Amino acid sequence: MTTLIRSAAVVDGSEAPRYRADVLVDGDRIAEIRPEADHSETGHPRADRVIDADGLVLAPGFIDMHAHSDLQILLNPEHPSRITQGVTTEVLGQDGLSYAPVTDDVLAVVRRKIAGWNTDPEDFDFSWRSVGEYLDRLDRGIATNVAYLVPHGVVRALVVGWDDQPATPSEIEEMQRIVAQSMAEGAVGLSAGLTYTPGMYADNEELLALCRTVAEYGGYFSPHHRSYGAGAMEAYAEMVDLTSRAGCALHLAHATLNFGPNKGRAPELLALLDTAESAGADISLDTYPYLPGATTLSAILPSWASAGSMEQTLDRLRDPVALERIREHLEVTGSDGCHGVIAEWHTLEISGVQNTELDDYVGKTVADIAAAENRDPFDVCIDILIRDQLGSGILQHVGHEENVRAIMQHPRHTGGSDGLLVGAKPHPRGWGTFARYLGHYSRDLGLMSLEECVGHLSGRAATRLRLVDRGFVRRGYAADLVLFDPDTVSDTATYAQPRQAAAGISHVFVRGRLALEDGRLTGATAGRSLRREEGGAVR
């Protein structure tokens, strides 16, 4: 089956100026690119199907460098949130917590621990255990391509457990073995969640050893570092130093500067990265183009309160003595789970719950709920955590627009939605990130040219991932492509209605098959896992 995309403005992912051309797709490959200047002599290529792209931009499919679709992509293989905004590849396994590699016992805890990210369906077949088996499961048919990061927190749980204790030298060696095996099975790097349990219990010697293993396989380290709040700059510097010592590439996950202490501090972060890169460090980063963050309500608890099993955490929430300590951290001294700052109850909006009895709380802040019920906000928070079995999702309204704009213009920046897709009112970034970059920040505000913006969302990410044949519009490359109207492309997802498809995106090809045609989902599931090969290249 051949498809001719005729008279498109090709923005090829390299950040070079656009040009008009016909692009011929044959099977799953870009077979020919014929610039408009050649038409007078050769005419248009012949094809089984023709798409008139006059007035439209043809770009590489976008790459979501920070996605949380690990289970949702299997539960809903058509994957409308990503396909409708032009995403053709996602990187999963983020923030140190995902579903492989696992044992039965670890999987049982992980499922409950990140139910607020992906839900926890009772009748779903979790038959895989290794990274390779998980990737094989994805290969049965999904809408987007997927690359996978080994989640450090899960590896630590396999070897050390869920408690707050240092890893012994032999345990670090075993974690290195698991990471090496997972990389050999196709993982592209290692993620960490250093404000989530049990990842936050790891010291830098443990992380250094694991990063050295990742570097041996040509992968990269993508940490959710120890603080995005009171200690953010120190946390960024810590990760830069750590990976420099390990000789490992660093990709900073959702590289934001949130909370009051960081207002206007983006230039400090960018100077830190530029200095490190000048000294030879290999650093990239991703961000989402919104102010609020999103996580689980339980994530704000101090690390000692979240140690061990879910049942142990819930027991602490019912213990008056433990509760007083938790209150001290959340309201006076600052919680390490809340990035070293106190919980500002008016910024914590409930975005989703597992317990339907709590449905009326969705869309309201903890402060709103407390005022309506004439209760103490801390008591409301604890009550929700207990009644929802730690499964509540939140939006955290703590961002700064000047930081968002400055960071997204950095030359090593890539796009990442950090999109959670579950709950009644999830963050709109899950449906709108890539269209928002193209429409609001590139076209409307002019912070970067369209060519630069597409490069942020495709070519730069492909380079970080070491993709062999994706991320650019080039002859012989995989036909992962998006066709959009540069004048109308925009995000329509809002905080009130977050599950709204982007406007202005008409066609999306994944491996040469149309997943979106004339703005409508086709149901195609041509996506597959992208696996690291010997030497570090990914295809």
Image (cartoon, grey):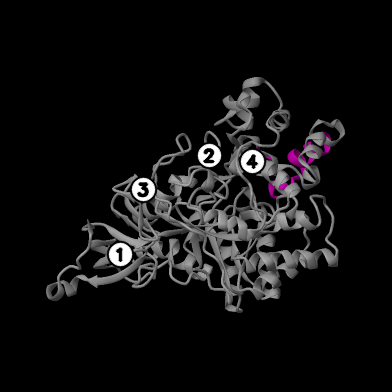
Residue at 78 percent across and 65 percent down: it is 174
The residue tagged 1 is 25
Magenta segment includes 67: no
Residue at 74 percent across and 67 percent down: it is 176
Q: CA distance from mark 4 to mark 1?
A: 40 Å
Callout 1: 10 Å neighbours few (<14), some, many (20+)?
many
The amino acid marked with disc number 1 is Val
Give the percent coordinates (x, y) of residue 15.
Answer: 38, 69
The residue tagged 4 is 115
The residue tagged 3 is 490
- Which is closer to the viewer, label 1 or label 2? 1
- Which is closer to the viewer, label 4 or label 3? 4
Give the percent coordinates (x, y) of residue 92.
Answer: 57, 55
The amino acid marked with disc number 4 is Ala
- Which is closer to the viewer, label 3 or label 2? 2
Evaluate if marks 3 and 1 touch, with contact meaning CB atoms under 8 Å apart: no
Region in magenta:
323-344
- Element at label 1: strand
Numbered label attached to residue 426: 2
- Which is closer to the viewer, label 2 or label 4? 4
Q: CA distance from mark 1 to mark 2?
A: 36 Å
Q: CA distance from mark 4 to mark 3?
A: 30 Å
**Label whose residue precedes the other's in the sequence (2 or 4):** 4
Evaluate if marks 3 and 2 touch, with contact meaning CB atoms under 8 Å apart: no
Q: Is residue 199 visible?
A: yes
Q: Chief secondary structure of the magenta span?
A: helix
- For this rendering, which residue is in front, 267 or 408? 408
**Label whose residue precedes the other's in the sequence (4 or 3):** 4
Evaluate if marks 4 and 3 touch, with contact meaning CB atoms under 8 Å apart: no
